[in-house]
Amino acid sequence: MDIFTILSLIGGLALFLYGMDLMGDSLKKLAGGKLESILASLTSARWKGFLLGLVVTAIIQSSSATTVMLVGFVNSGIMKLSQTISIIMGANIGTTVTAWLLSTADIKGTATLIKLFKPESFTPILAAIGVVMCMMAKDDKKRNTATILIGFAVLMFGMETMSASVEGLRDNETFIKLLTMFSNPVAGILAGTIFTAIIQSSSASVGVLQALSLSCVIPFSTALPVILGQNIGTTITPIISSISGNTDSKRVALTCLYIKMIGVIVIAGLFYLLHYFLDFGFMTMRASAFDIAVVHTLFNILSTIILIPFSSLFEKLAIKTINGKKDEQERDVFATLDERFLNMPGFAVEKCKELVYDMANIAMDTFKKSTALMEDFNHAQFKEVEELEASIDKYEDKTSSYLVKIAANQMSSKDSKEVTELLHCIGDIERISDHALNIAEAAKEIYDKKITFSEKATADLRVITEAVSEILSLSIQALAHNDLEAAKSVEPLEQVIDRLKRVIKNGHISRLRQGDCTMELGFILSDLLTNYERISDHCSNIAVCVIELAHDSFGAHEYLSHVKEDGEEFSSMYASYKQKYYVE
């Protein structure tokens, strides 16, 4: 083997791993966070978990990616340890799909129909289709589909390159001796474990073995223990991922390791015991790429059948191994902003949305408690308002920072736009809570100075309070449910609130001239009205964000100008709200 052969082998391996990574990433993007959401919402039913683990892993073609998801779900409190075990077992079978796809490289025959199923025949076609689609695609769905085709073509080309580069090793004595050494079960399992741990993918590791089998004589005696080791080596990814996690997330990774290790020990023990007594003749025969796919699948199916009845014991074993309280501490509301989810942008954005909705509801609660202080002030509720406003500041800091991290990753244009809109909405919600606190402070000033508004001013404030409460409800409903009807109702009401501010101010000036109000109360009233009006402005911004996201066209100023000029619907809603919130 010369330097050029080694470079060809390295290049083939690089293309193979890149193609697999490209295909897996595109499959996840195409799913748009739905697969992760389905897993996260799983009930405790064992069979559902098994089937979901199998299907999700077969789609994304990586059991490591599935188990890393589970580590993140458990770490953030979305799932429990007991729910993950059946999913892990399903993932072990789902990951075998890649080996079957790669086994097509071993198809032999000269008939035209058979030739069409050979990778060298169909992968150039897939690559050409993928490139044309990628160049012409205007939406993410088509672009991701194209990238899947290109990724698969690159993967198969890399496999063929590896196979061609090692063809000269067929009669190499040193290489033959090396293969003979791996025929020892312990050495073979160890080699498979180490190699797979390095590249962190059993699918890729099995693919490399299949590529070698196309050009070199790899006997079953070597292939079997290496495949067993590959199944253990793939657990390194969830183990590394769990290092920074809590106790339960570490237990998930350990459970994954235990399932693989015990499965290998049981299957290898039974097989080699039978081989000792029966002397299986096929052990000296050449293992083809198809045979390797069969062995890989059979191992995972048999070990799952044997071990799935003992699922609860794996949970107990993991808990026994890693001591710690079942619930180490009260769950952090921001635990769902897990760094592991950054590789799943669609799912990460969904988790941020949930926190933004929570944040909006807290802002609504802050406003209601603040305005209640205008009627009946008490220090305990004032302190509660301060605490709510402080919690919203924390929401803004944590969620915004996480959204910025998501934005640094590759994602679909839809996810990218949602990140931008959420960042805008977070800023508006935080400002709403600031204005709510200002209202509470105005109520405190009135209480401390022992002054009161006139009956008319009090009645006017109740009207504008109700109007702002409704606009807050509408904007939150629009944000939480993508309710376009609610979003369209916000701007007419915002215009009515602007009008209320002017009318109430003018009424105060009239009372001031008549001596019914004081300048001091006038300053407080002016501040209150400004805060009410600013809250409605921020509600308008949120509604515009919802409409922008739905139509993917309007800018804020363009939309506001459009709805006001487009007369009939806007005028009708404006007139309705004007009548509902009328002051003289």
Image: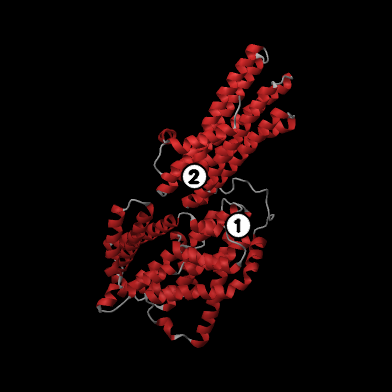
Residue lying farthest bottom?
A: 278
| Residue sitting at x 49%, y 66% | 55
Q: In which quarter of the image is the C terminus?
A: top right
| Residue 75 at x, y percent in the picture | 59, 53
Residue 130, quarter of picture? bottom left
Q: Is residue 514 left or right of residue 39?
A: right
In front: label 2 or label 1: 2
| Residue sitting at x 48%, y 68% | 94
Q: What residue does disc 1 label? A: 79
Note whether 450 is above or below 4 in the view shown.
Answer: above
Q: What residue does disc 2 label? A: 484
Pick the residue in front: 184 or 362. Answer: 362
Crowd tier of the residue under label 2, counting other residues whose Cα lies within 10 Å: few below 14, some 14–19, many 20 or above: some
Amino acid beneath label 2: Leu
The Cα atoms of the two marked residues, 2 and 1, are separated by 33 Å
Amino acid beneath label 1: Met
| Numbered disc 2: secondary structure | helix
